[in-house]
């Protein structure tokens, strides 16, 4: 049984004081039954992580957190980079790698993403490895093959024990921050193909246990239908995660389903 994961990617929003306020409002809206049912995480900017760590550790909260990027290097003369060791010391659980905005704006390629995943695993961080297609690829009908190519390149050279520690997020680029949402069936098609590919490069057991998330204009009004898909195990949430009440509603999707 794969425990759902709802991860709020705050992107370049919220200073450390705002981050504390949002996190406090979020945890106020969540109870133990929510954490028992769903892993709930926030992914703040680097400058907020220490404040979030202090809040969570001080109050012994069950909220998880992580980082939006990681350096492939361990240390040294890499101005502006943040190493996996630094993130681990800040108590991070997750690190987002290969997000479409990093690929498009910072020109990150599959080889660099592969190295970043290795750096995360070397520091016992859980990579949230992002893959997805642009609208032109979707319209050409090549979206599944495109995503599978990203999976193969990003995970090349990893052992089976390493594959077990990775979370994958499918994010159709055309549905990120646009208000457009892939249909639940669209999400299921690609997530199922990802799981099948993990079975090929890893094993059926690894594929069966791997959490695969959907990302792209996720909100409380559409999460229930998305989560009904058998191969979707949660969501990587962007703009909606900046609203703590909205993120809490998304995390409580299971309560709506069981009502």
Image: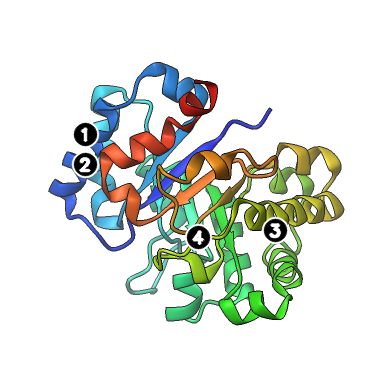
Q: Quadrant of residue 114?
A: bottom right
Q: Are marks 1 and 2 in contact (CB under 8 Å)?
A: yes
Marks 1 and 4 sit apart, C-alpha to C-alpha, by: 27 Å
Pointer 2: what residue?
A: 22
Measured along the vertical axis of the image, is residue 77 above or below residue 70? below
Measured along the vertical axis of the image, is residue 230 above or below residue 56? below
**Residue for point 70% across, 58% down:** 190
Instruction: Please state the total of marks drawn on the protein image.
Output: 4
Look at the numbered disc 4 and give the secondary structure of its residue.
loop
Pointer 1: what residue?
A: 25
Q: Nearer the viewer, residue 167 or 172?
A: 172
In the picture, measured across the screen, residue 183 lies left or right of residue 96, that is right
Of labels 1 and 3, earlier in sequence is: 1
In the rendered image, is residue 124 in sight? no
Q: Which numbered disc covers residue 181?
A: 4
In the rendered image, is residue 229 in sight? yes
Q: Are marks 2 and 4 in contact (CB under 8 Å)?
A: no
């Amino acid at each position: 049984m794969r425990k759902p994961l709802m991860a709020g990617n705050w992107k370049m929003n919220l200073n450390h004081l705002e981050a504390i306020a949002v996190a406090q409002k979020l945890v106020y809206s969540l109870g133990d039954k929510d954490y028992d049912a769903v892993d709930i995480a926030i992914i703040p900017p680097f400058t907020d992580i220490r404040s979030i760590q202090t809040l969570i550790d001080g109050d012994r909260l069950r909220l998880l957190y992580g980082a939006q990027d990681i350096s492939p290097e361990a240390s040294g003369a890499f101005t502006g980079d943040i190493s996996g060791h630094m993130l681990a010391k800040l108590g991070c659980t997750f690190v987002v790698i290969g997000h479409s905005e990093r690929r498009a704006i910072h020109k990150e390629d599959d080889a660099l993403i592969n190295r970043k995943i290795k750096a995360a695993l070397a520091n016992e961080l859980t990579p949230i490895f992002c893959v997805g297609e642009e609208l032109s690829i979707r319209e050409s009908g090549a979206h599944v093959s495109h995503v599978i190519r990203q999976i193969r390149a990003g995970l090349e050279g990893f052992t089976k024990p390493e594959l077990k520690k990775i979370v994958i997020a499918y994010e159709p680029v055309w549905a990120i921050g646009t208000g457009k949402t892939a249909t639940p069936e669209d999400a299921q098609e690609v997530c199922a193909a990802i799981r099948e590919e993990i079975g090929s490069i890893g094993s059926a057991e690894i594929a069966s246990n791997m959490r695969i998330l959907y990302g792209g204009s996720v909100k409380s009004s559409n999460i229930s239908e998305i989560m009904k898909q058998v191969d979707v195990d949660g969501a990587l949430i962007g703009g909606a995660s900046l609203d703590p009440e909205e993120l809490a509603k998304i995390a409580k999707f299971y309560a709506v389903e069981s009502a």
